[in-house]
C-alpha cells in the first residue's frame, strides 16, 4: 500500500469515528486525502518572515523570494500578502475547542479566549468550529451567523476524553474543500486520550494540508512531566504548517498572544508557483523558500516544508 493510499485509509477511519450534535452539520464522508494546492496546477505556500529579533518583516515583493521544489528552481506566478483584499484570497478561519474533562479548570479561559479572538479577527468569510471531547462535532458559520457562533461557544461544558487528533483531522478534511487562506486556531491542554487517528498519521495529514495552525496550549494545570511532552507535541503540530504555538499562563496574557497572531496573519505572504514536475504520482515534494535579498541571511523564513502531489486515478 502506497503512502497516499495509507493516508486515505486513515481519513476513512477518522470519518467513521466522528459524530455530529443536534443542529450541527453532519460529518461529511471522507474526501480524497487533502493535497496542498491552490488551483489545478498551482502550489501555494504561506510564508512568514522575521528578523533575528523575531520582528515580522513586511513590505516584501515576489522578487524577494526564491522557491525550489525537490531542488529545482520554480517560477513564482502568484503572490499576495496581508489580510484579504478585494482582489486577494478569501480568509477561512478554523476554531478548535477542547471541551474534554481534562479542561475543566480551563473551560472558562477557553470560552473567553475564543470569543475574544473572534472579536479581533472580523475579516474571515466563515468560521469552522470543531469542539471535541470523546466525540468530535463540526459546524461552519458565515459572517451573518456571528451571534449563533458566540452562543455555541458560551454553552460549552467539559466532559469525556480528549479526541484531539481526530478533531484536527476532521477540520483538515473539511478545509480541503475551501479555496483561499486557511488559518486554524486550536485551544487545548494537548493530552490526546481517545483518537482513532494516531500522531504519526496526523502529522502526514498536516503536511498534506495548506492550513496554517496556531496553537494556544493551556498547560498550567498539567503535571511537569505531562506539560513537557504535551508542549512538544503541540509545537510539532504548529511547526508542520508554518504556524506557531503559544502557552499563556492566564487570560491577561492573551492580549499579547492575539496581537502576535493577528500580526502574523497580516504579515503572511502567499507565494504560488506551477510545479515543473508534471508527474501525478501522489508523492511528497520538498519545498524550500529562501530570500533573495542581500540581507537574506539575517532573515528567518517560516513555511511548510512541502506537499503531496495529486495522484492520477
Image (tube, helix red, strand yellow):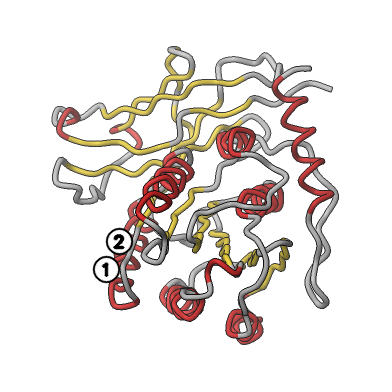
Report whether 33 appears left or right of 83: right
Locate the C terminus and report the quarter of the image it occupies. Answer: top right
Position of residue 274 relative to residue 101, above or below, is above
Q: CA distance from mark 1 to mark 2?
A: 6 Å
Q: Position of residue 198 (x, y in %)?
A: 64, 39
Position of residue 277 measured from the top left corner of the image (x, y, whole percent):
59, 15
> Could you classify mark 1 by the number of other residues whose Cα lies within 10 Å: few (under 14), some (14-19), or many (20 or more)?
few
At a point 34% along the width and 59% down the height, the residue shown is 247
At 46% from the left and 74% from the top, the residue drawn is 106
Within the image, what quadrant is residue 117 found in? bottom left
Residues under numbered marks 1 and 2 in contact, where contact means CB atoms less than 8 Å apart: yes
Q: Quadrant of residue 65?
A: top left
> Is 246 left or right of 109, judged from the image as shown?
left
Q: Is residue 154 above or below residue 300?
A: below
**Is residue 248 left or right of 135 when viewed as pictured?**
left
Other-residue count near label 2 (Cα within 10 Å), few / some / many at <14 / 14–19 / ≥20: some
Q: What residue is shown at x 39% (from left), y 53% (from top)?
A: 227
Tag 1 residue: 256
Secondary structure of the residue carrying tag 2 is helix
Q: Nearer the viewer, residue 244 or 178?
A: 244
Q: Quadrant of the N terminus?
A: top right
Position in image of residue 34 (x %, y %): 68, 38
Q: Which mark is residue 260?
A: 2
> Can you give x and y, in whole percent of width and height, for residue 103 in the image?
52, 69
Viewer-closest of 157 and 284: 157
Amino acid at each position: 500500500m502506497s503512502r497516499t493510499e495509507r493516508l486515505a485509509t486513515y481519513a476513512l477511519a477518522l470519518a467513521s469515528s466522528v459524530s455530529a450534535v443536534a443542529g450541527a452539520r453532519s460529518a461529511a464522508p471522507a474526501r480524497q486525502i487533502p493535497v496542498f494546492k491552490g488551483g489545478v496546477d498551482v502550489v501555494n505556500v504561506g510564508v512568514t518572515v522575521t528578523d533575528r529579533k523575531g520582528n515580522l518583516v513586511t513590505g516584501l515583493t515576489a522578487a524577494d523570494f526564491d522557491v525550489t521544489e525537490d531542488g529545482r528552481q520554480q517560477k513564482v506566478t502568484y503572490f499576495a500578502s496581508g489580510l484579504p483584499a478585494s482582489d486577494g484570497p478569501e480568509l477561512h478561519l478554523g476554531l478548535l475547542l477542547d471541551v474534554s474533562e481534562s479542561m475543566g479548570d480551563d473551560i472558562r479561559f477557553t470560552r473567553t479566549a475564543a470569543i475574544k479572538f473572534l472579536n479581533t479577527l472580523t475579516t474571515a468569510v466563515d468560521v469552522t468550529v470543531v469542539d471535541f471531547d470523546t466525540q468530535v462535532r463540526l459546524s461552519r458559520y458565515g459572517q451573518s451567523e456571528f451571534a449563533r457562533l458566540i452562543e455555541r461557544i458560551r454553552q460549552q461544558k467539559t466532559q469525556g476524553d480528549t479526541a484531539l487528533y481526530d478533531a484536527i483531522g476532521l477540520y483538515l478534511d473539511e478545509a480541503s474543500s475551501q479555496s483561499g487562506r486557511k488559518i486554524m486556531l486550536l485551544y487545548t491542554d494537548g493530552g490526546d486520550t481517545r483518537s482513532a487517528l494516531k500522531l504519526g498519521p496526523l502529522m502526514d495529514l498536516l503536511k498534506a494540508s495548506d492550513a496554517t495552525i496556531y496553537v494556544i496550549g493551556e498547560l498550567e494545570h498539567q503535571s511537569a512531566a505531562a506539560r513537557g511532552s504535551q508542549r512538544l507535541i503541540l509545537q510539532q503540530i504548529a511547526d508542520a504548517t508554518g504556524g506557531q504555538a503559544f502557552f499563556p499562563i492566564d487570560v491577561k496574557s492573551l492580549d499579547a498572544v492575539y496581537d502576535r497572531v493577528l500580526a502574523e496573519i497580516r504579515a503572511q505572504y502567499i507565494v504560488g508557483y506551477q510545479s515543473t514536475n508534471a508527474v501525478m504520482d501522489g508523492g511528497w515534494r520538498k519545498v524550500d523558500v529562501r530570500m533573495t535579498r542581500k540581507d537574506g541571511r539575517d532573515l528567518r523564513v517560516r513555511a511548510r516544508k512541502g506537499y503531496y502531489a495529486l495522484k492520477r486515478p
